[in-house]
Image: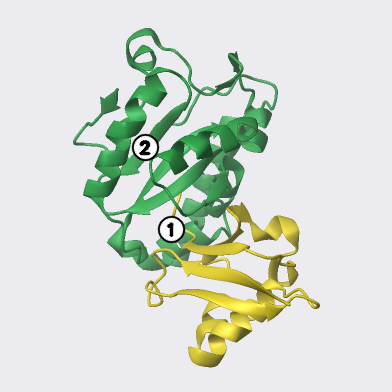
């Protein structure tokens, strides 16, 4: 089902059971992932397009998500102009061992450009020294103390989320 | 005999319209660096935009060879093969 909450930057495509029965779509062959497995194996295909194009793709993906052939997807509600990106992005999530099967579905829906990214890569971009965090800090024109506080907070959050590598990954609020 | 590889910039300003298929001698398979050089010849400043001060692939972008991060196959020296497609996307894409 498509979950479109106006307060969120994202529109989600998730199984209805995720919303109504707390079904965890972050799994592999039905087994939930540990924090380590999440970082090492979970990722997404990235699809670029204007909002209306991605809305159409979301509607086309919805039955695949309900059938659990595709775990989940999310798309930008609007373009991220402050980062110089001129299109919206959709993330179509899956385990690395399922990515070619998911790609076949995307290709069948007309997606042409292949771009895979692991969640670990995304996380690293938002850690101290990571390109996205540093760019965001620069854009906010913060003084050195506030910038350092933000870096520390980012590193602390990451440690809190992933300190126990063998614990079941419980998700990150977005 | 020649091979072709394609470079495609997805949402990368100010080069967002660039998509180029280029031909190389099959006897000496090109690297990602050579592809960037080839584009730079007709689009001055392209190489400088794509690389950091140390001559590595810029962290401002992700370079994907057939959909997979080029960092896993050698970065700037990643070897390319016939029909390879290089997609370049802004680092912000994907969260």
Q: Is residue B45 above or below residue A7?
A: below
Q: Which chain is yellow in the picture?
A: B
Q: Residue furthest top?
A: A21
| Quarter in which the C terminus of chain A is drawn | top left
Q: In this view, does B36 lie above or below A36?
A: below
Mark 1 touches mark 2? (CB < 8 Å): no
> Residue A57 — which label?
none
Q: Is mark 1 on a helix, strand or loop?
A: helix
> Residue A74 — which label?
2
**Which of the marked residues, 1 or 2, is nearer the chain's N terminus?**
2
What's the coloring here?
by chain
> Residue A146 — which label?
1
In the image, what residue occupies the spot 55% across and 87% down? B40
Q: Is mark 2 on a helix, strand or loop?
A: strand
Nearest to viewer (mark 1 / mark 2): 2
Task: Name the chain letter of the residue that bears numbered label 2.
Answer: A
Q: Is the residue marked by circle 1 packed among few (<14), some (14-19), or many (20+) residues within 10 Å?
A: few
Q: Which residue lies furthest to the right in this view?
A: B27
In the image, what residue occupies the spot 54% across and 54% down? A125
Q: Is residue B48 visible?
A: no
């Amino acid at each position: 089902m498509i979950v479109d909450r106006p307060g969120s930057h994202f529109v989600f495509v998730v199984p209805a059971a995720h919303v109504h029965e707390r079904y965890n779509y972050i799994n592999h062959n039905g087994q939930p992932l540990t924090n380590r497995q999440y970082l090492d194996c979970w990722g997404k295909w990235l699809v670029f397009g204007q909002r209306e194009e991605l809305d159409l793709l979301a509607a086309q993906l919805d039955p695949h998500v309900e059938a659990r052939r595709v775990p989940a997807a999310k798309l930008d509600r609007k373009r991220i102009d402050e980062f110089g990106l001129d299109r919206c992005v959709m993330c179509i999530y899956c385990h690395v061992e399922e990515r070619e099967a998911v790609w076949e579905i995307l290709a069948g829906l007309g997606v042409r450009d292949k771009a895979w990214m692991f969640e670990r890569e995304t996380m690293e971009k938002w850690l101290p020294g990571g390109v996205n965090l540093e760019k965001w800090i620069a854009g906010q024109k913060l003084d050195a103390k506030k910038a350092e506080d933000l870096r520390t907070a980012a590193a602390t959050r990451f440690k809190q989320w992933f300190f126990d590598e063998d614990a079941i990954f419980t998700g990150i609020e977005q | 005999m020649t091979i072709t590889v394609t470079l495609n910039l997805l949402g990368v300003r100010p080069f967002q319209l660039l998509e180029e298929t280029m031909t190389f001698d099959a006897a000496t398979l090109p690297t990602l660096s050579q592809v960037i050089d080839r584009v730079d010849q007709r689009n001055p400043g392209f190489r400088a935009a794509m690389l950091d001060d140390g001559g590595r692939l810029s962290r401002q972008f992700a370079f994907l060879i057939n959909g997979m991060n080029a960092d896993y196959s050698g970065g700037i020296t990643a070897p390319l093969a016939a029909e390879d497609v290089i997609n370049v996307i802004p680092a912000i894409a994907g969260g």
